[in-house]
Amino acid sequence: MKIQTTLAGSYPKLPTEPGDVNVRVVRNRRDQGKATDQDVAAAVRETTRRIIGIQERAGVDLVQDGCAGWDDAQTYVARGLEGVKIAGLIRYLDTNTYYRQPEIVGDVRWKAPVTADDFRAAKGMTSRPVKALLPGPYSLLRFSKDLHYRDPVKAGRAVGEALAKEARALEEAGATWLHFEEPWLGKATSADAPAIRAALAPILADRTAKTLLQVPFGTPTAIFDSIADLPWSAIGLDLVESPAAWDLLPRVPKGRGVALGLVDARNTRLEDAADVARSIARAAAARPDLEYLLSPNASLEYLPADKAEAKVVLLVEAARLAARNGG
Amino acid sequence: MSRGLWTTTVGSFPKPPQLERARQQHARGELGADALFQMERDETVKLIRRQEEIGLDILVDGELYRGDMTTYFAERMPGFAISNPVRSYGNRYYRKPIAVGPIRRTKSLTVEWWKFAQSQTKQPIKGMLTGPYTMMDWSFNEHYPSREAMAMDLAAAINEEALALQEAGAKYIQIDEPAVSVRPDELPLAVKALGRAAQGLKAKTITHICYGDFDVIYPALLDLPVDQIDLEMANSRYDLLERFKAQPFTKEIGYGVLDVHSHRVETKDEVKQGILRGLEVLKPEQMYVDPDCGLKTRTMDEAFAKLEVMVAAVREVRAERGIGA
């Protein structure tokens, strides 16, 4: 079988080789008045080029730009929306990381493309297809403090409609794959289903690009039947932290895809490629009719850069092994 | 007269700029360990004096000699390696512990610093440790077969350190577990590990946890086997009090009244109102008033200004309500 490899979000920004551009250093110098915003933008571009190069050398099929200019998975996009302001730092869902909390203070509206230029730049750096990343509308809502709608269905719909316009801008920039980061789908209960549908429906309607709903740090078991009929192309399952997500495979509608999150993006221990290949074979045996991608279970950004690169190499090795084994 | 509303802090203070520079120089090999150590001691003494001037009842050493709250301990315990830099947020990075073998305590981790700090003041100094669940959750694991196995080894090691602090004379021992609120499904493991870490302690035991999904973890949170649970109250606009009305908070509470994520210094009246709201639901003898979390992310001016407001507000409430210290 052929399984496409891809990453699952942002990537470490620090270089592993001395002499490479270090965006952290440039940002520090900018904060000290010794470098300019243009210097930071150039360092972000070089970092993106390096991140894409790592994926190309490893042989990743569907590359990502690594979000080299983002502070976290929410605010880069959220701060470009009308009706949203960015507040203080709070702890993110997983281990010892933070984000600035968006606050919804008025009607949420899309103003102008936020990520399209970044996407064009990344696309120009590689001949491989580039998967564009956006926060998922439901998770963006849950990570935010809603001080305006105070109604999750109305708020979800508004956030979804705003992000749908950003998705359209990415399609116009040439995106053929859109990754929506949706960790809160893995923590939702059936009571959340109306808000989830309200948020997801706009971003999935009338898409020319394929859509991936990436669900790290949990399993969307409780709400899966509520979203199964929505027109997403693939769902990203975290099979490292949530082995129960395996039970969703029989429930995935025909004609859809599954991104198998089999490589642990939150631990430095390197998996055995043969073990990963066996898990791919298990999925293929259970549902041979589905299309598969292989990815880490979450973004690799919170690993040290050397360990993240080793995981990228392993990802491709496992996929090739699975292909050789016919699995 | 009832007693209560004792004032304290959660642990960390901002490092003075000259100490930050010295730490960077030390990291680059431009400043020796002895010189850095002396500066850390000098700044710790100044910080203790400052806490006394502000009028806090229970002091801390301020952790000016520590970097990250997990890495500090991991660097001193066999079984841990330290990673290359890992991002925390934005442009902030830290070196994260990696469990690469059995984790053990083979020497004192904090006791000497506690003794030094306590020798500088008549006020009690809290012993400050990072809890086993948080140490486990915030480290990489390349050795242990399960999260529980790693947490329980850490719990045994931290228990040795806590007993050593008690032996040295610590009357308050705080074992922080900020990670507890992030994974509600693992609360039973956190309870078990903290129970092991606090085993045999006669000192007052405290744990600080950060704001999380209280709809899921409360009132099970009260199972944490310590005398006092320290909570962020101001950051959540005191909405936990509604939960406490329905399901009483049965332990002592570290009652956070200062938003440590905000540069703004609270007014005395808003802190006072927060305390008065607490007194509608809690008894004064249950309440230890403090900031929401460690102050290390604030500037020194902000941190001290916030604490001065807090102590002034407590004094007014004590006077109005006839509450003794």
Image (cartoon, coloured by chain):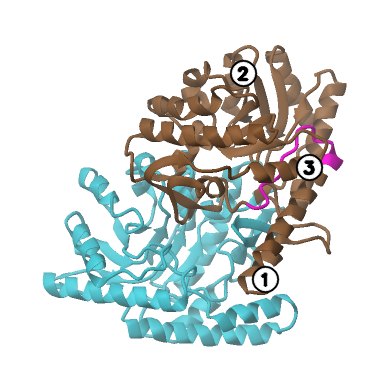
Kindly identify the amino acid type of the residue bearing the numbered disc 1. Answer: Arg
Crowding at label 1, few (<14), some or many (≥20) Cα neighbours within 10 Å?
some
Q: Estimate the spatial distance between the alpha carbons at disc 3 and disc 1, rounded to whole Å.
A: 28 Å
Residue A153 position in % (x across, y down): 37, 30
Residue B298 position in % (x across, y down): 46, 70
Closer to the N terminus: mark 1 or mark 2? 1
Kindly identify the amino acid type of the residue bearing the numbered disc 2. Answer: Leu
Q: Which residues are magenta?
A: A55-69
Q: Which residue is mark 1?
A: A29
Q: Which residue is mark 3?
A: A124
Asked whether, in this view, residue B110 is left or right of residue B240, the answer is right
Q: Estimate the spatial distance between the alpha carbons at disc 3 and disc 2, rounded to whole Å.
A: 36 Å
Q: Which residue is mark 2?
A: A249
* Residue in view at x 62 percent, y 41 percent: B146
Residue B80 position in % (x across, y down): 68, 58
* Residue in view at x 58 percent, y 84 percent: B18
Q: Chain of mark 3?
A: A
The majority secondary structure of the magenta stretch comes to loop
Reply yes or no: does residue A62 show up in magenta: yes
Crowding at label 3, few (<14), some or many (≥20) Cα neighbours within 10 Å?
few
Q: Is residue B46 something that shows in the picture? A: yes
Tell me, what hue is chain A?
A: brown
Asked whether, in this view, residue A264 is left or right of residue A201, the answer is right
Q: Estimate the spatial distance between the alpha carbons at disc 1 and disc 2, rounded to whole Å.
A: 49 Å
Instruction: Name the quadrant of the C terminus of chain A.
Output: top right
